Image: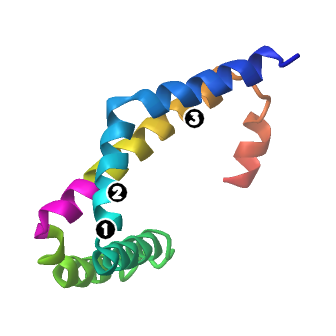
Amino acid sequence: MKDNVEIYTLALIRVIHDSDAYREYKTVRERVAQEPDLKRQINQYRKECYQLQNSGDVESLFERTQRFDGQYEEFLKNPLVEEYLRCELAICRMLQQIASKVVESVELDLDEIADEIN
């Protein structure tokens, strides 16, 4: 017999899959998949964006961000690209909010360790 955590986890997954945001994302993802070159370009943009945000090089971040924005300015005007990235961001934010609420609700004794790590 499944325990309640597993049961409710599966129920949460079903609710996410049934959400308007996820259904919209899947529809747009399918449209993008029909254009392999566009999909490749979107993935390249996502990869470079991730690398920029996680590079750790704060000193040149402004200049690199300006260069990155200029490089992709025209690309981001494509309505399908904009829609895909908007939908993906909505899903990511939903998942972040869910994870944050779960983590905040569980009282783990991590304060002393967190102080030492920071």
The correct choice, above or below, for 5 with respect to 45 in the image is above
- Residue at x 49% of width, y 39% of height: 95
The correct choice, above or below, for 69 with respect to 33 in the image is below
Q: Nearer the viewer, residue 37 or 6?
A: 37
Residue 9 counted in the magenta span: no
Q: Position of residue 9 (x, y in %)?
A: 66, 26
Q: Mark 3 and 2 residues: CB-CB less than 8 Å, in contact?
A: no
The answer to whether residue 88 is left or right of residue 50 is: left
Residue 39 falls in image quadrant: bottom left
Can you identify the residue that label 1 sits on?
34
Q: Mark 2 and 1 residues: CB-CB less than 8 Å, in contact?
A: yes
- Residue at x 34% of width, y 43% of height: 90
CA gap, disc 2 and disc 1 = 7 Å
CA gap, disc 1 and disc 3 = 32 Å
Q: Amino acid at mark 3?
A: Ala
Mark 2 residue crowding within 10 angstroms, few (<14) / some (14–19) / many (20+) = few
Can you identify the residue that label 3 sits on?
99
Q: Nearer the viewer, residue 49 or 29?
A: 29
| Element assignment for label 3 | helix
Q: Amino acid at mark 1?
A: Gln
Q: Can the viewer see residue 67 in this picture?
A: yes
Earlier sequence position, callout 3 versus callout 2: 2
Q: Can the viewer see residue 89 in this picture?
A: no
CA gap, disc 3 and disc 2 = 26 Å
From the image, state whether disc 3 or disc 2 is nearer to you.
Answer: 2
The correct choice, above or below, for 51 with respect to 26 in the image is below
Q: Nearer the viewer, residue 62 or 73?
A: 73
Instruction: Tell me where the magenta segment starts and ends, as one range.
Output: 77-85
Which label sits on residue 30? Answer: 2
| Element assignment for label 1 | loop
